[in-house]
Image (cartoon, coloured by chain):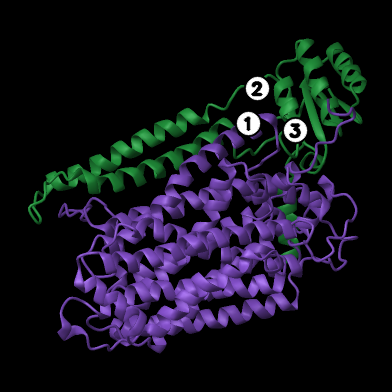
Amino acid sequence: MIAALGRQIDKLLAGKPGKHQGVMGVFYYVDDAASAVKAAREQGHKNLTVFSPVPHHDIERANEQGPSLVRWITFTGGVLGITGGFALCIYSVMSWPIVVGGKELISLPPFVVIGYESMILLAGLANLLGMLALGRLPQIGLRAPYDPRFSEDRIGIWVPCSGQASEKVRELLRGHGAEEVNVHA
Amino acid sequence: MSGATVTDVPKSHGERYDDATHARGPEITQKSINDDVMRLITRPGPLWWAIFLLDLLILTIGLLAERNQIVHGVGVAGHTRPVMWASYVANFVFWVGIAHCGTLVSAILFLFRSHFRRAVYRIAEAMTVFGVLTAGLFPIIHLGRPWFAYWLFPYPNQRQLWPNFRSPLEWDVFAVSTYLTVSSIFFLVGIIPDAAAARDRVKNPYLKLVMTIFSFGWTGSNNQWKHFYGAYLYFAAIATPLVLSVHSVVSWDFAMSQVPGWHSTIFAPYFVAGAIFSGVAMVINLIIPIRAGFKLHHIVTMDHLEKLSKLVLLTGTIVTYSYLCEFFLAWYGPSSYERDLFWWRATGHFSWAFWIMFGCNAGVPLLLWFKQVRTNVPLLFVLCLFVNVGMYFERFVIIITSLARPFEPMSWDVNYRMSWTEGAVLAGSFAWFFMFFLIFVRLLPAFSIAEIKETLPPPLRRKPS
């Protein structure tokens, strides 16, 4: 029973093989991968994907990656949080106005704590949602062929292309030190 | 990068590492890091099961005590006037304090680019999440009618009743629930790339399913890394003021009142320093057995332990300064009640608790000035246990002595002693915390595979210019 369920889980997780068109190069050396990315981009392949176990600045530079836009989503969450926190406190005292200890109904200093914590809460949630949305997570189907070695110590460069361009890309990746190049037609 | 991470390695995996000689061994590679961290995620042995079952037994005793309290009322806990906030509130502050180290290590040290955090931050973060989960129980446990705990949260209702947002207790609800949410997100987001590495290696289908869920389908593409680190930086940036605010808010539960011994502006920084002090000590207490049990001396090196112990020393001196400041302010200030209370703390009925606190928190950590102590692993472990005992007693002393010695002398008849119910619930809270921790260590990557790999020099064909 447990083994049969395990087999079903294995089958479910394996999924169906995706149909991809392009060339995948597997690299060990970071400088080789960075120069391959640069050369591929110079050939006009701007839409390439690099898989790696850790991010490498050399490859990011070669790929001309800009900063993540997630910071604006985080900022928006923070602004909404602080506004919402203060608004909740002010609404609650105005909807049931009881003066306690001769204090102002809208007592801003104690409301700062609620506004501040709400700002951090919503900024954190927005940050998470921003990261997931921009990073396209959770990812169910693969957009490029994936190899478990990419989470260990190898770098993969996926260049979407077809036809004669595939042959050129294959030569390019091999020429820049790829250990293995696979053409997916 | 931390040079020690790469150089302090055992001669071979499985060989007993000699902390004293710092024996050099084979080079650590990206693959060996995967292998080492994955060794933790294997079928647990009899020792793990024995500890886990003992833990569950203690938890059951705690749950039975809590059941007894719910049925018969908080009277069974021995709470009576004037000490109505007794050990449950002390437990709450203790566990919130323990929870502070994780965010310090993962967020503040990340912003300061202190790379030694990479080897220890996952365990510290797990400790944070489980610490807040434990702390959050106590405000509910100490309620007379715990089933109405949801009244603490603001929610629309037909009577348009809202909580009092001017009350520090309501601030606490916001601070602790925000802290639990943000620290859990921070913890789970950090696990994503490592869960993917584990997903690609485990054979057991059930474990593979768990890793697939925790990895969110991560592939390590350039787009994912870009937004991951973009978000991680901002998690660190928002978690840093959060961690400082949470224990400040906890301290204001006391400092905003007029009670002698509580009404002090020093409380916020004093509590934050104390929280980090106990939290780092707890990280050392947790990491030393894991390091020894799984032979991970090359991942958590002596250098890491020494740096953590220096943090204990630093925060310990801040805590000691705060103790002395409190006494100075009582002596120099205008309030005779304050003077009387502080004198009573050190010489009265609960002086034994005060001197345990002072000895463990102000005296024992001074040994960490000596490198021989910082690098002696068993001694460091015992010393950190003393720190945690001392920090528990700090909360006990602050809460119970102040309540037992209020303004009216007619209430000075000391009638508080810890009941078996409180003791069982306290033991149960430790079991609750360790239950999560024991499961975590065997189920998820307890060390950050990706971040430890970043400490290695990247493989280059050409020499770096």
Query: Residue tagged by mark 3?
Result: A51
The shade of chain A is green
Q: CA distance from mark 1 to mark 2?
A: 8 Å
Q: Which mark is residue B226?
A: 1
Image point (30%, 47%), residue name: A114
Circle 3 SS class: strand
Q: Are marks 3 and 2 on the same chain?
A: yes
Q: Which quarter shows the C terminus of chain B?
A: top right
Q: Nearer the viewer, residue A80 or A24?
A: A80
- Measuring from the top left, give residue A143's x and y in whole percent: 70, 30
Q: Are marks 3 and 1 on the same chain?
A: no
Query: Residue tagged by mark 2?
Result: A65
Disc 3 is attached to a residue of which chain? Answer: A
Image point (88%, 66%), residue name: B15
For badge 3, the amino acid type reads Phe
Kindly tell me whether residue B454 is visible in this rendering.
yes
Comes first in the chain, label 3 or label 2: 3
Disc 2 is attached to a residue of which chain? Answer: A
Mark 1 neighbour class, 10 Å CA radius: few under 14, some 14 to 19, many 20 or more = many
- Measuring from the top left, give residue B258's x and y in whole percent: 20, 65
Q: CA distance from mark 3 to mark 1?
A: 12 Å
Q: Is residue B126 left or right of residue A21?
A: left
Circle 1 SS class: helix
Residue A101 in the image: above or below residue B349: above
Q: Which chain has been coloured purple in this picture?
A: B
